[in-house]
Image (cartoon, rainbow, N blue to C red):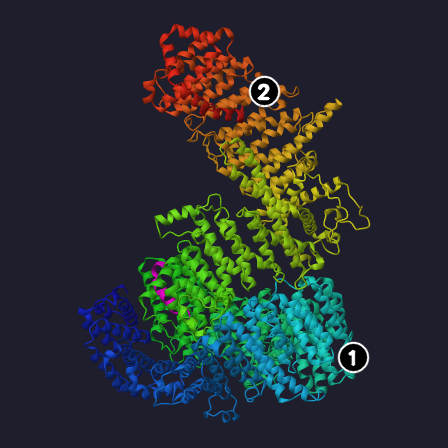
Amino acid sequence: MELAHSLLLNEEAYNQLGEFQKAEFIFEWLQFLEKLLPADIRENQKKLVEQLTSLLNNSPGPPTRRLLAKNLAVLYSTGDTFSVYQTIDKCNELIRSKDDSPSYLPTKLAAVVCLGYLYKKLGRILGNSFTDTVGNVLKAMKNAESQGRYEIMLSLQNILNGLGAAAIPCHRDIYKAARSCLTDRSMAVRCAAAKCLLELQNEAVFMWSTDLDSVVTLCFKSFEGSNYDVRLAVSKLLGTILARALTSKQITGKTCNEKFSLEDVMELLGTGFLRGSCGFLRASGDMLKGTSSVSRDVRVGVTQAYVVFVSTLGAQWLERSFSAFLSHILDLVSQSHPKAVQSAVDAIGCRRCVSFILRATVGGLLGEKAQIAAAKEICQAIWKLKKVVDAAISDGNLETKINTTDVTASQHVLVCALQELGSLIHGLGTTAAPLLQDSSTGVLEAVISVIVHPSISVRLTAAWCLRCIAVALPSYVSLLLDRCIERLSALKSCPEAVTGYSFAVAALLGAVKHCPLGIPHGKGKVIMTVAEDLLCSASQNSRISLQRMQAGWLLIAALMTLGPAVVQHHLPRILLLWKCIFPSSSKDLETEKTRGDAFTWQVTLEGRAGALCAIKSFVSHCAGLLTDEVVQRLLPPLPSAVDLLTQLSSIYKSYGNSLKTPSTVYRQKLYELLAVLPPKAYEGDFSAVLKELVTDLTVTDSQIDASAFLLPSLCHENDLLLLGPLLQETDHRFIEEQLLLGNNITGGSLEYDPYSIYEKFAKGDSVPKPLPPALSVISAASRLFGVMFSHITESHRLQVLEQLLNSIKQTKGSRQQIVQLHIVSAFSTSLKRLANCKGSLGSEEVRRSALMLVMGALESNNPLLRCAAAECLARLAQVVSDSAFTAGLAQVSFDKLKSARDVVSRTGHSLALGCLYRYLGGISSTQHLNACVGILYTLSQDSTSPDVQAWALHSLSLIVDLAGPLYHVHVEPTLSLVLMLLLSVPPAYAEVHQSLGRCLNALITTLGPELQGIHTAVSALRTSCLLGCAVMQDNPDCLVQAQAISCLQQLHMFAPRHVNLSNLVSCLCMNLCSSYLLLRRAVVACLRQLVQREAAEVSEYAVALVKESKEDFTPVLSSQPLFLADVNIREIGLEGALLGLLDKELDPRLCQDIKETLTHMLTSMAVEKLSFWLKLCKDVLAASADTTQEEETTKGDDVSVLTSDSDDRFHPFRNPRWSTRVFAAECVCKIISQCEKAGSAHFDITLAQERKQRDSRDDFLVLHLADLIRMAFMAATDHSDQLRLSGLQMLQIIVRKFAAVPEPEFPGHVILEQYQANVGAALRPAFAPETPPDVTAKACQVCSAWMASGVVSDLNDLRRVHQLLVSSLLKVQAGKEAQNEQYNESTSTMEVLAVLKAWAEVYIVAVEKQKNQSDTHKHSLKIVNSSEESYRDVTFSASGLLDLVQADLGTLSKLWLAALQDFALLTLPPEYASQLPAEGGTFYTAETIENARPHYYNSWALILYATALWLTSTGFLIVDPDEGVTNLSRPVTPTTMCQDSSTRPLVKSPEDVNTDRFHLILGISVEFLCSPGSDAAMENIIACLHALQALFDVPWPRSKIGGDQLGVELLNVLHRLILTRESPDIQLAALEVVRLILFAAQEHVKEKRRSAEEKETLPEFGEGKDTGGLVPGKSLVFATLELCVCILVRQLPQLNPKLTCSPAVPPGKHLLLSEDGSRLVAAALVILSDVPAICSPEGSVSVLPTILYLIIGVLKETAVKLRDGQLPLTVAASLQALKGLLSSPMARAEKSQNAWTDLLRSALVTVLDCWDQVDGLLQELDEISLLTAITVFVMSTSPEVTTVECLQKRCIEKFKTTLDSKDPLVQCKCYQLLHSIFQHPNKTVSYPYIHSLAPSIVGKLQETEKAKPENAAELQVIQEGIKVVTALTAAAEEQHRAHLVACILPILISFLLDENALVSATISAKNLHEFALQTLMQIGPQYSSVFKKLMASSPTMKGRLESAIKGNQESIKVKTTKHAKNPGKSSSIQLKTNFL
């Protein structure tokens, strides 16, 4: 194939190939040429033209001829056109040729195609040659066969396209030819003709003026017998022409004077809808009097044309003309055309079409504002019709049965109007609120007024419409329910009102599960009462007994959908009613039979069917209540119900036809109930029920072909693709469904089964469509048969199967097929059940019967039945699962396929082979596979029958897919076969191409990742796959293009480098708005995959493509024109185009894919293209804001709708739907989180501005803050509740992320401060009384976030938001009585808890801030230069915030405690349920306990923390005076816990109250921390730990836990928490709690010791008593140690002695801990050093070794030098801990002193050994830390520890070596340590050190006289040395002092400089000079005698000193004040405070 990649055809390579390879080679070359062609080809043009024209004679296949023609056309358009006429002549010659043989046909067709493309590309350049060409082509058409006609039509379309207006002379001829083709018998030709005429009408004025009537009639004729593609193409033509006729301005004088009005055009369409394709006159009345019924294809076609017509005129036209349009559309089903609606079947069909037109136009084109206007119009229409009905009813006498024409006439119009109104409001969601509040329209009144319409279908649709309103606006559910129940009770005697209002109530109950906020619990009780009342009063008045019976059971059935929580309260009454409706014994049934008449039987059957339905609803919706006991109570009436079933036929015979429907409905409901009950429950009735089932399935008088309903669910979804587009999902599925069915059935409608009104439906707004009872009973029977067949015995199975076989034999013709269909569907269902439960079928005979049953159907004429039978056969093999049986099945099919010649058996058996593979890869022996593949190869090349080819190829694709690796040997031949067929099968056979696509897809999957290989064989396979994809992409059929896209998607997954991404993306963009749903789905699914890897590339290619190919890029416009993708992509990129598509698209799966695609693009690109993404989201959100805000802007000017067209460019999104806006708001939140990951510059304005200045392309989120706030504001104040929630969420995120960003221009302020007005304005509406609770709850979160963020420091500004929270708090205080009656009680729980949580958060932050401030205050007092103002400002804000909360704290604390008490009750295990208060808690009711739980789980943690803080702040001391008797309207303190009022003491003592509160908080915390679920939020755990910290921060609770076992339990809980949670925050918080518990224990021990000392009894206190033993589980010390070891070993595994030997830890290697790790280790060490304090002396001896080991271990492992000489945190902590430990009183207590001394000596040895262990690693070790440790030992322990000679010696040794260190820092630290040792009060300790080390120090100082310091570090060393010596002098005994002073003075004086030297000296020298002078000034006076003596003896010294003193007298004064704090000192002080 590589040889094909050249500019000229490589003829040498070409001639060596075989016939088939040649075709491939040519196609590959043409493809390559197409990519090259725009290049300069002048010198090769002649040769190329020769090669290309010679190919015409090689009979090229369809794809090749198209590509050849394209290349020729491009060749001439870019090169010279001199030889083009020769080429055209050649083509014409080929067309004229008399050769009619099939082999010559491809050449002729190629010539036709070439002409088309040449004229399309070159157009008018070709001058007048076109008349001859067109004449020639039209002449050829006269005797062309269908392929020829097809190609000629497409070529003419191209010629017209190229020539434009120049072709006018030929228009009439072309028009005549196309007319005949439009009604051609070949569907492909009809499509082509429609495309040709569509092109023609661009220039041919006569088509939409003089000849309009005949064009329209012609289109109607074309719809007759058409398929889906024809209907799409012709409806597009018809709609476009009519739109043109309406809008054209240029009708010339000659043709026609009148202009078509909207009425004329609509009437033309209406004629087709009502009369079909009969000829007609353009007169108003006569045409409607015909009698023939309209064929469905025509009606469906015309329906689509209506939609195209409106879409072409556009949304704004529809807004302007909606009123006229609506009245015309509704008129189609009105009484003025009685023919259209004379039969129920026709009426249902027409209603569907009208609904479709309204949905597609009003729902698909209009924005929300226009939709609201449309809804008002529809409402007006309903009112008008209502008046007509009222008039008709009031005229006639009410007693006479109302049957006036007007009433029945209006019913269909009303049904359509109500359905559209319901769908509109459902789509608008809460944005429809203004519409319903508008009293002038009266939407609710209108709908409710027709609930009592005489027609049942109107009553049902009105109820459905109410349901849609309720789902859209949940706040109306309760209101509507109350209203309907009230009317129902009031109008109990009117039959219409009883049924109408009961339908409405049932529909509203069905809506409740779609409303998350629910309805008040009490409503269930009211409805139950009404239902009981209706049932009990049914027998009182025979006129309405039927309606009451039906209504009562309907209400009970609908009530079940509210779920177990509501139903359990009414269950006993329901079961009683159920028991009473059936006779209790068979005897009673007999007496019933003798007594009744037709009417009573009708009432009885209706009632019992209702009861069955109610129980089925109970089983489906309340499975949780189905305990064994309940099931036992359900069973008794069943035998009686089955008895009645068996008697039905005799009852029906006795009482005639009036019982036909009720008895069918009864059967259906009983079957449906039995199918959901466990089969064990009715085992005894199996045989009776089965007998009835078999009768129902084989009943011969059924003339209805129900295959379209029964079978699709039983076929595999992939096999249904074989049966054409009708079974696939399309945009027109809603109306196309009618065409699937036989003539006497149109599909479902609500009036067939009123019980479906409360069920849940797949698509939210589409009306349920239950089938007529005659059909429903069959589908129910087949389902039940499936259940029962798997539960009966084998002999019984055989009997049943034989009975079924006989019944098939006894029927003939179409009836036989219907029986067969029922039986196959039932049997297939049973096999499905058997396979699922792994059951077996039975013996040989059963298998044989089953096989005969299926084989018969496999050769049925109905393709759907064949498909189901093949699936059934495979399931049979799966159930039998015996390889011999399966092989036998396959053999039967092999034999049949070899012998049979008819299409039916060949298709059926070939599919059976594929299906067998689907369920049993087990038959994959290679010879079996070879046989299968061989036969299917042969069949797929049978060009006489495209059907056989399609089925065989489909089957082959299944085998390829399922045979797995075994298929590899066949891949190459199969791929060749697929390619050969792709290149040769005519495009008209789309089904063959679709099957080929599936084959190619399966082959690519089989090859999988191997496609990446580089072998020649793999490369050839890959090229073939790509070639196949290219052929399919060029196919005119959209579904084949969809296949091509999914094949390329697979290839891209396995071999991404080999797929040309830019071509693929261009193909995807072209089809983004195709009119085929499946193609759009394929496009988006492919995009979704591409953007996961290469989002940026895909986005760039899309934009580049639009810019490049402006003229080519006309995307396939949809029949619902979504939008022109190119305009959008050019302006707003692919992302914007996808957002636009998301807004217009109605298919949920596609919308989901688009969202995922956009999310992937956002995650990978939002940060780079930040402005672009934010603008996109802003455009979408602002589009909605314009609609709400433009009322204010355009006050006076009445702008025409059309003027807004001009700014369409600036606004890419016109009125997006609320769901799109919600998605945009979610995108903004995702963008913020992406930016957070990207870096801090996005949240730091100074940094962002700097970087932006450096590189203007950089973009940062913080620069767009104004936009973010505006978007959040727009969303949060919208009409749509969903959007408000998203907007508030966005606002919360913005506040959290930007709260701390400072405003660079105003220091001390933050950037968000300027937006406080916006935030306040966004929040205020959410607290309005009518706002739904979920929005208010969300707003509370934002309020607390805003107040807590500290953005606003001014109290007055804060008050705005604070006021909102205060208002909510008042609402909470009002209590249960003031609850909202609209929603479920649990919503008020949600709102209350949200308010309390918000307050809690604010309080927590206020307390924390105040705490931080008091810390900073203490700190700032030390710092002199802190600015006073800033400090004052800060304290004010924090204490201000606290003051704000303080005002309400009294109330809040009670409410918080009450909420915590509720939560504590709700967390009790189920077995304590009986102890819960019967009336519920403070904030929840007992009935809604389950719904309330999640709200408590959501908010308890912060409330707990706040309560703990509040209790701490009062120190547990204040108890409310009215604690016992609260003045709130409900009990809100834990004092009331689990006590009834009689036993409650009036007032508890403060101690008891406090203890209760303490245990409440502790209990909740421990319960939660014991087992926080893996999903428990981090915040909750941390809040809980903080609460415990706060609790133990004050003495009283500590006293409770200090000496109690509670402490140990709590430590164990914390230990487990630390083990299971890795988060450092959690672990640190837990350690803090541990520290406090330990502190509590210390206090306890101290207190005990103190009181013992007073009493003078001295038992041992503390753990370990007098034995020193610690009991694990009981011991606090043990628990503490365990926990600390856990922390330390996890951070420093080397500490574990077991690990140190293992190879996992390399010895001696130091690990640097993370910052968090260091903090954890430090915290653990602090705790460790406190442990001995709670031990007895003996106990302390037990734990000391462990503690020392750990502290010194940490020191040893982490004492590493850091660059800046800083001590690592862990080292500082371990030294601190060591100091704490060594100074413990236990070291000196008499009982433990000796042991401690020994242990401490050992510890010191360990520290000393640290030096020796490290050999080569000395450089890492930090000597300073170890020296400090030694110093700590020396200073803090009793002298006997360190004065042992050997130890002392080693210590001194260490100091010596360190003093000699080269590092000045080390020397400096060493001096400081010695300084402290020398000053040790105990001389035995300090003297040895002084003796050994002082001489060398003095010696070192003397050396420095010569070498002056060069830098600050050296200077500091000298200064420290001098300090040590001066300290020594002070400490020396009197007699030695003079000697020391004499040493030190010369050194000091040598550092002084004279005036001249001082000027030029270095800084260090100057500083040294000053320091020396200062020291001299201090020493001089102290030792004046020595001083004077020395001065006298050395005049030079004296001179130096005097000059220095004189020279610097002034400066010395200044400097002495400065040097009071000299730099050297601060560090030594710090060390002292730290460790020594």
Give the mark, 1 or 2, whose residue is nearer the N terminus: 1
Q: Where in the figure is residue 1959, as x and y percent of width and height?
A: 33, 22
Pointer 1 local density, CA inside 10 Å: few below 14, some 14–19, many at least 20: few
Determine which quarter of the picture holds residue 705: bottom right
The residue located at (43%, 58%) in the rendering is: 1173
Q: Look at label 1 and name its amino acid.
A: Gln
- In the rendered image, the residue lying farthest to the left is 43
Who is closer to the viewer here, 1128 or 113?
Answer: 1128
Q: Where in the figure is residue 846, as x and y percent of width and height?
A: 60, 73
- In the rendered image, the residue lying farthest to the right is 1542
Residue 29 as seen in the image, left or right of residue 663: left
Determine which quarter of the picture holds residue 1529: bottom right
Determine which quarter of the picture holds residue 1750: top right
Residue under label 1: 540
Magenta-colored segment: predominant secondary structure:
helix
For mark 2, give the secondary structure: helix
Residue 1064 on the magenta span: yes
The residues colored magenta run: 1056-1074
Using the image, tell me which numbered label, if any, was put on residue 837.
none
Residue 1158 on the magenta span: no
For mark 1, give the secondary structure: helix
The residue located at (56%, 25%) in the rendering is: 1779
Q: Nearer the viewer, mark 1 or mark 2?
A: 1
The residue located at (56%, 56%) in the rendering is: 1323
Please identify the quadrant where the C terminus is shown: top right
Please identify the quadrant where the N terminus is shown: bottom left
Pointer 2 local density, CA inside 10 Å: few below 14, some 14–19, many at least 20: few
As drawn, 1363 above or below 1422: below
Q: Look at label 2 and name its amino acid.
A: Asp
Residue under label 2: 1798
